[in-house]
Amino acid sequence: MPIQWRDAMSVGNEAIDEDHKKLFLLVNLYEDAIAKHNLFELKMAFQGLYEYTAAHFEREEKLQAAIFFSGARAHREEHQDLVRRLEAFNAGLSDEGKPRISLEVAGKFLHDWIVNHVLQADMKMRPLLMGRPR
């Protein structure tokens, strides 16, 4: 089931919210490529997701520093953990046509991780961001 953005997912910062919408779209594209069994599309979707995730994490961590977010260290560790997992997933995508990882398991993990991270970890910033210029 594709991830659908809802206004209740807003952390109170337009740039971060737009990043989250894009990440949802990229995870949805990845899951769609899995369903189609299209390894080329899968690799392209994964590469886009990996690159955008890294850029988003950098923006989010800079924002956390600017608002003196007390949970920044733990939040950064969550980001680093996901990057390590993404690198492991990427290593499991074989160029020989048969992936060495369960694409469905990887897709479910990414789907659940991004939704849970936005709704739980990122929402902790919301009280500090509400009322600030967007």
Image: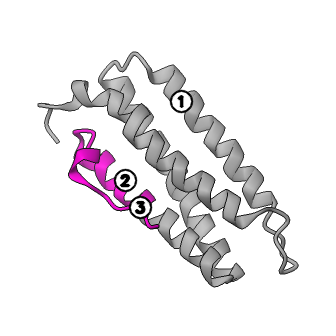
Separation of marks 3 and 1 at Cα, in angstroms: 23 Å
For residue 84, side relative to residue 20 (left or right): right
Q: Is residue 10 above or below residue 63?
A: below
Separation of marks 2 and 3 at Cα, in angstroms: 14 Å
Nearer-N-terminus badge (1/2): 2
Q: Is residue 5 magenta?
A: yes
Q: Amino acid at mark 3?
A: Ile
Q: Is residue 3 magenta?
A: yes
Q: Which residues are magenta?
A: 1-24
Residue lying at 84% horizontally and 70% vertically, measured from the top left: 94
In the rendering, at what x and y percent does residue 99 appear? Answer: 81, 70
Q: What mark, if any, has residue 76 been given in the picture?
A: 1
Indicate how the structure is coloured in the image.
one colour
| Disc 3 target residue | 3
Nearer-N-terminus badge (3/1): 3
Residue lying at 74% horizontally and 56% vertically, measured from the top left: 89
